[in-house]
Image (tube, rainbow, N blue to C red):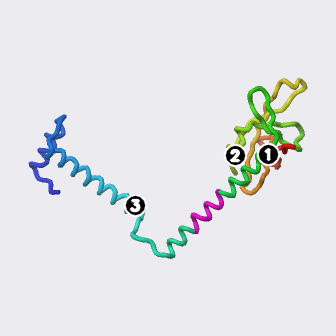
Amino acid sequence: MDNHPTETLDVESISKKETYSTEEKKLIMDRLNEERLVQQKAEEALEGKKGPYTEEEKTKILNKLNEKRLSVQKREEIQKLRTHKKKIYKFGNKEFYKFKNMEREYYIEIEDCNKFSSRPVIVTLFYKTVSEYELKKKDVLIKTEIYSEKFHISMDPIRVYFKGYSLEDDR
């Protein structure tokens, strides 16, 4: 659309109104559409979008997506194996899993088991004292490896040394 001086005056007078005629609505909609198209073209140019893909590009993209899907699927299966058919302990109104082969009987909340990734995270583990009604807390670093069913735990968050532990199986 051409910007005529009368048209700009119309736009200025239109912007002060609260109700619009059909002609004014059409003018406003045309302006907004024009701005949207310019913005869309600028975004496409920045993203480097181009026309239709060749068969070779399509197969490469599909292969990458398939690899990513398989990786995510494998990670989810391993994560499920870590906690599938494990013995559940109840203390108060919370549910815990128990680690086996540790120097103490350490317990982890079931809710915390889904938060882990390959990056270490500080998590609170619980252990029993002489009076079995009280649970003490200990903060540790925990991470998981992509293809390992074990939780890798470092008891000292300052001197990091990870050792693999698994959860107690349900008998």
How far is disc 1 from disc 3 in space, using C-alphas? 50 Å
First to last magenta residue range: 63-72
Q: Going from the N terminus, do you reach mark 3 or mark 2 first?
A: 3
Quarter of the image where one finds residue 90:
top right
Whether the magenta-drawn stretch holds residue 78 is answered as no
Mark 3 residue crowding within 10 angstroms, few (<14) / some (14–19) / many (20+): few
Name the residue type under label 3: Leu
Residue where numbered disc 1 is placed: 85
Task: Provide the secondary structure element on which disc 2 rests.
Answer: loop
Q: Residue at x 38, y 61 (%)?
A: 44
Q: Which mark is residue 99?
A: none
Q: Which mark is residue 116?
A: 2
Q: Which residue is at the front of the view, 6 or 64?
A: 64
Quarter of the image where one finds residue 43:
bottom left
Whether the magenta-drawn stretch holds residue 64 is answered as yes
Give the dominant element type of the magenta stretch: helix, strand or loop.
helix
Residue 94 percent coordinates (x, y): 74, 30
Q: Residue at x 49, y 75 (%)?
A: 55
Name the residue type under label 1: Lys
Name the residue type under label 2: Phe
Residue where numbered disc 3 is placed: 46
Mark 2 residue crowding within 10 angstroms, few (<14) / some (14–19) / many (20+): some
Residue 136 percent coordinates (x, y): 81, 28
- Please give left or right for residue 123 compared with residue 165 in the image: left
Against 19, residue 144 (above or below) is below
Task: Provide the secondary structure element on which disc 1 rests.
Answer: loop
